[in-house]
Image: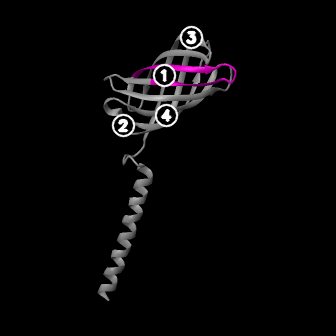
């Protein structure tokens, strides 16, 4: 009788351990770290515009606040297709201590002054060296020069 109870307890414990391990893998992903919420905002200025055969290249510089970065600056370069209103590009977030977070940008204008899209993180320096993840963003460019942006997503490190 005792052996049967012990066997049952061991079987239940094994099932709980397996379920816990499967849950941890699903929530932490292949990197072994839990996704971290990543949320922030920025205010910036378009610092350069040039037209080319592939579209219009915009460069911008901004400052903002974000989780895991704190106060930061960012430099970005976008290639805008003026016919479709879509754009792609790259951006570098730089934290106050100099650590950088790198990402690509893809999005589209939803009105004459507002755009939506996604940041896809692809590493960086310092604490962001192996960072991955994504964040959705909403940007507003009311006067064609100054912009604000809010973003919300996750980072995995």
Residue 18 higher or lower than 99, as above or below: below
Distance (Cα) linking label 3 and label 4: 24 Å
Q: Residue at x 56, y 11 (%)?
A: 49
Q: Residue at x 31, y 30 (%)?
A: 126
Q: Residues within 10 Å of mark 1 (few under 14, many from 20)?
A: many
Front-most of residues 138 and 55: 55
Q: Name the residue that disc number 1 marks.
A: 42
Distance (Cα) linking label 3 and label 1: 20 Å
Distance (Cα) linking label 2 and label 4: 13 Å
Q: Earlier in the sequence, mark 3 or mark 4?
A: 3
Q: In the rendered view, how is the structure colored?
A: one colour
Q: Name the residue that disc number 3 marks.
A: 49
Residue 113 drawn in magenta: no
- Looking at the rendered structure, the secondary structure element under dot 4 is strand
Q: Earlier in the sequence, mark 1 or mark 2?
A: 1
Q: Residues within 10 Å of mark 3 (few under 14, many from 20)?
A: few
Q: Residue at x 57, y 24 (%)?
A: 139
Q: Name the residue that disc number 2 marks.
A: 130
């Amino acid at each position: 009788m005792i052996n049967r109870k012990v066997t049952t307890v061991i079987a239940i414990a094994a099932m709980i351990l397996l379920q816990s391990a499967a849950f941890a893998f699903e929530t932490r992903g292949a990197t072994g770290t839990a996704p971290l919420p990543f949320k922030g905002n920025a205010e910036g200025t378009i610092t350069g515009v040039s037209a080319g055969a592939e579209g219009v290249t915009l460069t911008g510089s901004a400052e903002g606040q974000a989780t895991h970065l704190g106060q930061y600056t960012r430099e970005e370069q976008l290639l805008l297709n003026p016919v479709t209103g879509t754009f792609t590009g790259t951006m570098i977030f730089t934290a106050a201590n100099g650590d950088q977070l790198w990402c690509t940008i893809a999005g589209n204008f939803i009105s004459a002054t507002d755009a939506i899209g996604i940041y896809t993180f692809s590493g960086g320096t310092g604490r962001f060296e192996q960072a991955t993840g994504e964040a959705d963003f909403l940007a507003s460019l009311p006067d064609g020069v100054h912009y604000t942006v809010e973003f919300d997503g996750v980072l995995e490190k």
